[in-house]
Amino acid sequence: MSSKYKAKAKELIHEFYPNVQWKLGQEDCLDRAKRCALITVNEIIKNNLEYLRDVGLHNDVALNIDLSYWKEVKHEIENYEL
């Protein structure tokens, strides 16, 4: 996988990490941060798919590239470890 997907996954996870730090172990915080990042990415993917469906631009190259990007970021989030 490309390092740009890994970098975006790490950025999103670390963006949420401080917001989920309570009196939990490091793994619990990471898991919560990953879930928050996945919610964000899933919303982006869902909105792009809805837009493609509503507008009927199934062959819109830019949106399909964007969808591919976010799907790769999602994959990296799911597999991210400290």
Image (cartoon, rainbow, N blue to C red):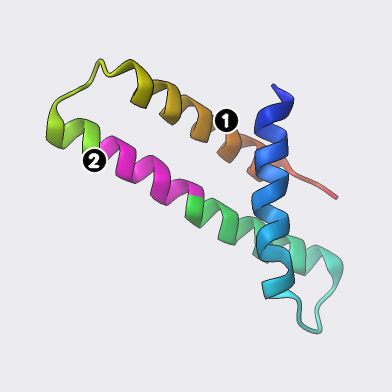
- Residue 25, x across and y down, in percent: 85, 73
Measured as percent of width and height from the top left, residue 62 is found at: 37, 21
* Residue 58, numbered label: none
Label 2, label 1: how far apart the Cα atoms are: 19 Å
Quadrant assignment, res 23: bottom right
Residue 10's x, y, as percent? 72, 46
Instruction: Give the residue displayed 71% in from the left and 35% down from the top.
Output: 6
Mark 1, other Cα within 10 Å: few <14 / some 14–19 / many ≥20: some
**Count of numbered circles in the view:** 2
Left or right, residue 44 beside residue 47 = right
> Residue 79, relative to residue 1: is it above or below?
below
Q: Mark 2 points at which residue?
A: 50
**Residue labelled with disc 1:** 72
Among all residues in the image, which is located at the extreme front?
A: 62
User: Does 42 lie within the magenta span?
Assistant: yes
Q: Nearer the viewer, residue 14 or 22?
A: 14
Relative to 17, say whether 39 is above or below.
above
Q: Main secondary structure of the magenta part?
A: helix
Dot placed on the residue nearer the N-terminal end, 2 or 1: 2
Q: Which amino acid does label 2 sit on?
A: Glu
Estimate the x, y position of residue 32 in percent, counting from the top left.
Answer: 66, 65
Q: What stretch is highlighted in magenta?
A: 41-50
Residue that sits furthest to the bottom in the current view: 23
